[in-house]
Amino acid sequence: MSIVLDGTVGIQRDQSGQVANVIWFLYGLPADCGEPKNVVFLNESFGVNSPQMISFDLGGEEYVVYADWDSSEEPSQASELKSFYRKYGYILISCLREEVKIKHGLVRREWITPVKYYEDYVTMVNDMAKVG
């Protein structure tokens, strides 16, 4: 069973307005669990016009985060994310974690890691069945 996290997707643009970077800023990751592994991006999580999402393994658990916009209402943003991950194949995940050693208690952690792009859930499952 996956743990669904709250998060925000930020798109940074260059001077010409093209997507230069995408950041998934997450809330609720436990402290000191290592770094995200086996990251997957689904363009459509449940079918046509469903939210985009990422999932990853961290500290023995699977986490899921959905994009904070409706793909059917924001088709240009959804299309830009799709193109970005198909082209670059890496993802930037950022979060605040509690750190006992830090006086203020929170420290920002970021990871740039490979991400496997899938158009939808069925495509991902079929691809994984071929490997297994």
Image (spheres, rainbow, N blue to C red):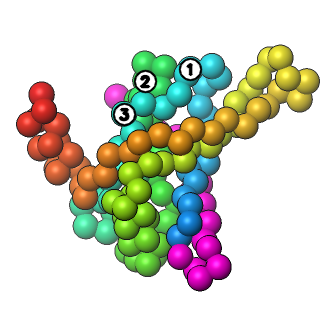
Nearer to us of marks 1 and 3 is 3
Rendering quarter of residue 8: bottom right
Look at label 3 and name its amino acid.
Answer: Asn
User: Who's the residue at 54% across and 47% down the image?
Assistant: 92
Residue at mark 2 to residue at mark 3: CA–CA distance = 11 Å
> Mark 1 and 3 residues: CB-CB less than 8 Å, in contact?
no
Look at label 1 and name its amino acid.
Answer: Cys
Q: Mark 1 highlights which residue? A: 33
Rendering quarter of residue 78: bottom left
User: Who's the residue at 42% across and 63% down the image?
Assistant: 84
Q: Secondary structure at mark 3?
A: strand
Which residue range is magenta in the image? Answer: 1-18
Per the rendering, the mark at residue 61 is 2
User: Who's the residue at 54% across and 58% down the image?
Assistant: 22
User: Who's the residue at 11% across and 44% down the image?
Assistant: 126
Query: Quick one: label 1, few (<14), some, or many (20+) residues within 10 Å?
Result: few
> Mark 2 and 1 residues: CB-CB less than 8 Å, in contact?
yes
